[in-house]
Image (cartoon, helix red, strand yellow):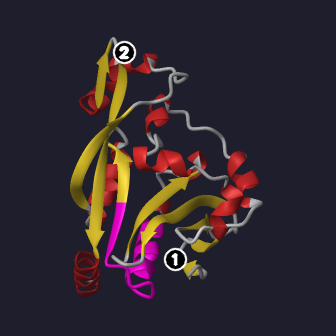
């Protein structure tokens, strides 16, 4: 299933063990709200595995994303693969120096073409923090639509004082706070194969 995929500026190839070392060397995001971006789904909490074992999990596949210089800049994965339904759950992340340069959108296009082409998936799912507006808007542009939502609690160790700053008032609609704790809204989004093919055909005709 995992072959090398090419875009104009990116190359997706199977994740390797040493990629975890390179990923750990990425500088942290200078964005306090990023503590909300990767709160796991409740169904996934019992399936935590170390990165090195992903390649041997038939329900999960990971690709490293490289730029034109061959530098590892991100990763994209399929997990919770349901072969009976021909659907899987997408995950994507990039190092902080490579965000906001269009790499994410290009990677998604290359990856979705592969999922709905050679892999013959019928639907791709994902979940995303509502507060991560850049990611949500990217998925909307690609054709993902909303299929539900849930609320998740960040770690008790996370510093959430940034929420008191007016700078972050735009994400407050996606946050619940009370004396009992803090919860963040996550959206369930999905993209059927027919929708993706229709959009790709329209894009080709518009050229």
Q: Nearer the viewer, residue 192 or 134?
A: 192
Q: The C terminus is located in which quarter?
A: bottom left
Q: Which mark is residue 8?
A: 1
Q: Tell us which disc is closer to us: 2 or 1.
A: 2
Q: Which mark is residue 164?
A: 2
The answer to whether 31 appears left or right of 24 in the picture is left
Q: Position of residue 138 (x, y in %)?
A: 34, 57
Disc 2 from disc 1: Cα separation: 42 Å
Q: Position of residue 96 (x, y in %)?
A: 57, 46
Where 46 sits versus 192, above or below? Answer: above
Q: Which mark is residue 199?
A: none
Residue at 28 percent across and 68 percent down: it is: 191
Where 181 sits versus 25, above or below? Answer: above
Q: Secondary structure at mark 2?
A: helix
Residue 119 in the magenta stretch? The answer is: yes
Classify mark 2: residues with Cα within 10 Å, few (<14), some (14-19) or many (20+): few
Residue 73 in the magenta stretch? The answer is: no
Residue at 36 percent across and 23 percent down: it is: 182
Q: Position of residue 74 (x, y in %)?
A: 58, 58
Rendered image quadrant of residue 115 = bottom left
Mark 2 vs 1, N-terminal side: 1
The answer to whether 46 appears left or right of 187 in the picture is right
Q: Position of residue 56 (x, y in %)?
A: 66, 69
Q: The N terminus is located in which quarter?
A: bottom right
Q: Nearer the viewer, residue 138 or 183?
A: 183
In this picture, which residue range is highlighted in magenta?
105-125
The answer to whether 177 appears left or right of 40 in the picture is left
- How many dots with numbers? 2
């Amino acid at each position: 299933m995992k072959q090398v995929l090419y875009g104009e500026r990116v190359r997706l190839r199977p994740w390797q063990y040493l990629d975890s070392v390179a990923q750990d060397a990425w500088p942290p995001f200078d964005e306090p709200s990023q503590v909300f971006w990767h709160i796991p789904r409740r169904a996934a909490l019992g399936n935590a595995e170390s990165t090195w074992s992903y390649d041997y999990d038939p329900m999960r596949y990971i690709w490293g994303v490289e730029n034109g210089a061959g530098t590892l800049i991100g990763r994209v994965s399929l997990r919770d693969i349901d072969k009976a339904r021909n659907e899987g759950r997408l995950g994507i992340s990039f190092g902080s120096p490579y965000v906001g340069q269009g790499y994410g959108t290009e990677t998604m296009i290359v990856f979705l073409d592969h999922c709905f082409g050679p892999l013959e998936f019928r639907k791709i799912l994902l979940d995303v923090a509502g507060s991560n507006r850049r990611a949500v808007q990217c998925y909307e542009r690609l054709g993902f639509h909303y299929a539900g939502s849930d609320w998740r609690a960040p770690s008790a160790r996370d510093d959430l004082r940034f929420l008191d700053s007016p700078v972050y008032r735009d994400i407050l609609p996606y946050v619940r706070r009370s004396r009992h704790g803090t919860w963040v809204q996550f959206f369930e989004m999905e993209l059927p194969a027919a929708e993706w093919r229709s959009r790709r055909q329209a894009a080709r005709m518009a050229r």
